[in-house]
Image (cartoon, grey):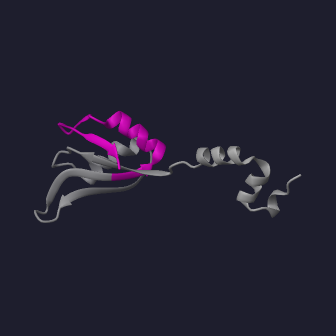
Amino acid sequence: MLVVDSLPPLQLLRNTFSVPTLLIFIVVVQKRVAMRIFVTNLNIRTTANHLMALFVRYGEVKSLKIIRDMDLKRFTGAALIEMEYNNGMMAISELNNLNFMNHYIELEEV
């Protein structure tokens, strides 16, 4: 019988599972928590509020950065958004090639 409180988590796993099962277990348990989404082909009038309203439907937006050309000091038509992995995958699948503010936006995980 194992006493759970006295064993560190890895030792508990070693005592409970065989080595091949342990390796499979670790791979399955390891999942991505957050993802970054690169959005391109945005309208030059797009603001952070516009993007927040678009992406918040899919879950909490952890960060949102509109990318500007530092030399020209103008909007490049791209943004970087960070959100929870599963919500991000759903946003990418539903928003990629969407006509947003008269531009077909493109999304990809980075």
Q: Residue 59 at what x, y percent from top left?
A: 44, 45
Q: Residue at x 65, y 45 (%)?
A: 25
Residue furthest toward the right? 1
Classify residue 63 as left or right of residue 47: right
Q: Residue 65 at what x, y percent from top left?
A: 30, 57
Q: Is residue 94 magenta?
A: yes
Residue furthest toward the bottom? 71
Residue furthest toward the left? 72
Depth check: give the residue in front, 80 or 18: 18
Classify residue 44 as left or right of residue 30: left
Residues in magenta, as a range: 81-110
**Count of all numbered marks drawn on residues in the image:** 0
Classify residue 15 as left or right of residue 55: right
Q: Residue at x 32, y 36 (%)?
A: 95
Depth check: give the residue in front, 97 or 109: 109
Q: Residue at x 78, y 49 (%)?
A: 16
Q: Is residue 51 magenta?
A: no
Which image quarter: residue 68?
Answer: bottom left
Q: Residue 101 at what x, y percent from top left?
A: 20, 39
Classify residue 40 as left or right of residue 7: left
Q: Residue at x 17, y 53 (%)?
A: 76
Q: Residue 87 at what x, y percent from top left?
A: 45, 42
